[in-house]
Amino acid sequence: MPRPSVTRRNFLKGTLTSLGALASPAMSGLNAAARRLTRHLPWYKQPATITYNYCDICPWRCGIIVSSVEGRVVKIDGNPNDPKSRGRLCARGQAGVSYMYDPDRLKQPLIRTGERGEGKFRTATWEEALDYTAEKLLAIKDKYGPESVAFLGHTSGDFWFTDYFAQAWGSPNASKPSMSLCTSPREEAATLTIGRAIGNHEPVDWDQARCVVLLGTHIGEDARNTMMQDLANARENGAKLIVIDPRYSSVAMKADVWLQIKPGTDTALLLAWMNVLITENLIDSDFIARWTVGFDELAAHVADKTPEWAAAITEIPADQIRATARMFGEARPASVIVPGRHVVWYGNDTQRMRAVYMVTALVGGHGRPGGQFFNKTPFLEAYPHPPFQVAGSSGGCGAAPGEESDTLSPGPTGKVRADGVRERFLRGATAMQELIEPMITGVPYPIKGLVTYGSNLLHTIPNVPRTIEALKALDFVLTIDILPQDHVAWSDVVFPEATYLERHDELWGCGHKTPYVTMREPAVPPLYDTKPGWWMARELGLRVGLDSYFAWQTAEEYIDRRLSSLGLNLTKLHEQGGVMVQKGKPYLTDFEADGTSPFGTASGKVELYSEALAAAGHAPLPDYEPTPDGPAGFFRLLYGRSPVHTFSRTQNTPALNQLMAENAVWVNDATAAELGFADGERVWLENQDGVRSGPVPVKATPRIRKDCVYMVHGFGHNTPDMKLAHGKGASDAMLQTRYALDPISGGAGMRVNFVKLVKGS
Ligand SMILES: Nc1nc2c(c(=O)[nH]1)N[C@H]1C(S)=C(S)[C@@H](COP(=O)(O)OP(=O)(O)OC[C@H]3O[C@@H](n4cnc5c(=O)[nH]c(N)nc54)[C@H](O)[C@@H]3O)O[C@H]1N2
Ligand SMILES: Nc1nc2c(c(=O)[nH]1)N[C@H]1C(S)=C(S)[C@@H](COP(=O)(O)OP(=O)(O)OC[C@H]3O[C@@H](n4cnc5c(=O)[nH]c(N)nc54)[C@H](O)[C@@H]3O)O[C@H]1N2
Ligand code: SF4
Ligand SMILES: [Mo]
């Protein structure tokens, strides 16, 4: 095949996608090209069967085309019809084949025989495992009420348990890590400030942006496929890029300006930016007058928050603060701070996120070309079912924009969620980490049963010793997973699930610039004795008296009924390429012409000053709150993503393990030299509470500040059953024995832990 010539466009895309390593060829006719290539490979003995799906290797859910030959999946490509993948995938998406054929997968239902945590099980039939589970759950319900079973879940099939089953069963204690361990502060700040949630797809109008700011979000290492494409395009179109990170990240290398901020001081920087924008009149006064409330209070609040004031806090020179504020203001209104995704940092995170949206508001960037647009949610009717026992959903990446994920709706016996909302934090989706304590203490009421679907409890929730204590204390633990991850050993029953390539599943549609609906159909039948999540939820539902919620017999029947509201069914959707793109109003609403407010706040405007926060006893305008430094000799522990792994999910995937088998600890090179650590030397990390993880090699580099160290999340697996991942690298979760609870959103700020380096392999 002739190589495409290297134009500036290709080069830029190439460099960006190479951050994500191995991204697919950058061309829209990918599938045809891929098929032409693969036709000649030895395994390609007959035409491939094509199935449509959406990738489940990370929560982004790119549309994919799966090719299988003789009952074996051979290749995954991006679906060109899909607005997220646009025909391309990241390295992880392509490794889905390797993920599915991981020989260490869970293969049969298991029932515990040894002590919890020992990992001793016997195999069981589905019939036996389901009956036993139903009996245990009903016993808890009879004794304590349905609220005493918690449902924790992630990955795309979590809908069946964390949403559908939990609500039908009647537990308000259902939660996803994608909220309080990820986006809660961003969502609550958006709801408080602009009256709309952000949702799965960050609504940044990359196409027209002229100045983009990445504040502690590292697109490229955080390999969200569409975001990498969008950023490459925006740069090609001449958008300025400002990156703020204590670390010279891959994307910082691509920036016009990189501000090496002191960790935890971002709110001071944002306040100083507002000071410059206002004092130098780099604001959109018409937008502010018409569409915001509280500007005068804000102007007074930031009057003394000068660049010099912020320089002393952030350790960024004042002239750089001033210059970047000007760069941002001069591009108005096509200027935007990307909301970021993992925003639980230091505990005061909702206030920082409010400041983020306020900076964008000052330049008139909300709902304007090149700013932050308003997502549109696709139309799709629900499958009809009796009213749920508990209203509201657990929230999560799939929560529709504008949908209020907060719920104080009680369960059938009158108990509201046990996570301390309204007592220890103000609002938001159920906080996953706050459901652990009641499992141990029984306060405010006992949680005795736990159903975990597709969430890696011991790598996901900070304070691992506490989670283990909770797992010991529970009456019953059901785990649904595809791999024998560390928490599986703590279960009473294990349901092995078929992967996304082997099952039908709920349709996927999220708030997006282009609303769309996409489907999942199996490429091959389930391997081993594994089953799809929808089947397990239904079989369990029938056994615990929830028959009326599971009127459908098969997933196809359920999906066809939903698709009928679009004049489609699975066969037709397959025939049209697996994706249904919906039309709607322009994504940048015409609110300025017709005067209809797009802002769902009480005032119908962007609330710079928040009466709602003031009334609840919180600061109505964001303040800079210092985060305490660590003990002498310790470094703040920062963490993030690798382009070739998802969380703690893919370390055992052969194709990805080959690319990165362990993590390293980034240490400033001068500091490493002072301490006597050579580059590549193996060290243990020991935190402020004496917990150790490792050993890992030192990456001695000038790319990080002296007061912190950095590592990729998700390594340090204990279980010998995951042979490739076992014992490799260090676990950031283990080292996060502490977290700071965000008093507004219930988010768990995890960057409040400190480590020292200890010699020894
Ligand atoms: N220390 C630390 N903690 C963090 C983070 C961090 O960076 N550091 N990041 C936070 C963020 S942003 C998020 S979104 C969360 C992510 O939290 P999780 O989603 O819990 O993280 P994963 O490690 O991907 O765990 C997914 C689990 O689902 C299983 N699984 C995969 N596919 C399937 C499937 O098809 N069916 C079933 N039943 N199971 C499946 C995997 O084997 C694994 O056990 O973690 C949060 N917690
Ligand atoms: N390859 C890959 N991509 C992913 C995922 C994955 O597992 N793998 N997970 C997806 C999910 S669910 C999420 S939530 C996102 C997360 O992706 P992001 O939202 O990009 O967040 P992090 O990965 O936590 O990035 C942390 C960055 O913040 C910097 N940082 C640390 N402390 C501070 C600070 O105080 N101030 C500032 N300004 N910066 C700081 C770190 O150096 C690091 O570069 O990634 C998504 N994309
Ligand atoms: S970004 Fe990569 S891993 Fe995530 S859904 Fe898309 S292709 Fe899959
Ligand atoms: Mo996340």
Image (cartoon, helix red, strand yellow):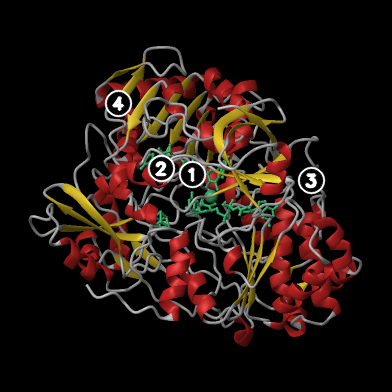
Beta carbon at label 1 within 8 Å of ligand 1? yes
- Quick one: SS at disc 4? loop
Residue 623 screen position, x and y as percent? 83, 56
Quote the CA–CA distance across marks 2 and 4: 22 Å
Q: Exactly how many numbered labels are in the figure?
A: 4
Task: Work out how far the residue at label 4 is from the one at label 1, CA to CA, in angstroms.
Answer: 25 Å
Given contact means CB atoms under 8 Å apart, are the residues at marks 2 and 1 in contact?
yes
Check disc 4 and report the residue beneath it.
Answer: 109
Q: Does residue 388 lie above or below 728 as drawn?
A: below
Disc ID at residue 650: 2
Q: Mark 3 or mark 2: which comes first in sequence? A: 3
Note whether residue 561 is visible. Answer: yes
Task: Specify the quadrant that holds the C terminus.
Answer: top right
Q: Quadrant of residue 11?
A: bottom left
List x then y, in percent, for residue 261: 73, 58
Q: Earlier in the sequence, mark 3 or mark 4?
A: 4
In this view of the protein, which residue sits in the foreground, 331 or 339?
Answer: 331
* Quadrant in the picture for residue 418: top right
Secondary element at tag 3: loop
Q: Amino acid at mark 2?
A: Thr
Identify the mark at residue 647; answer none if there is no mark.
1
Say which label, 3 or 1, has the lower sequence index.
Answer: 3
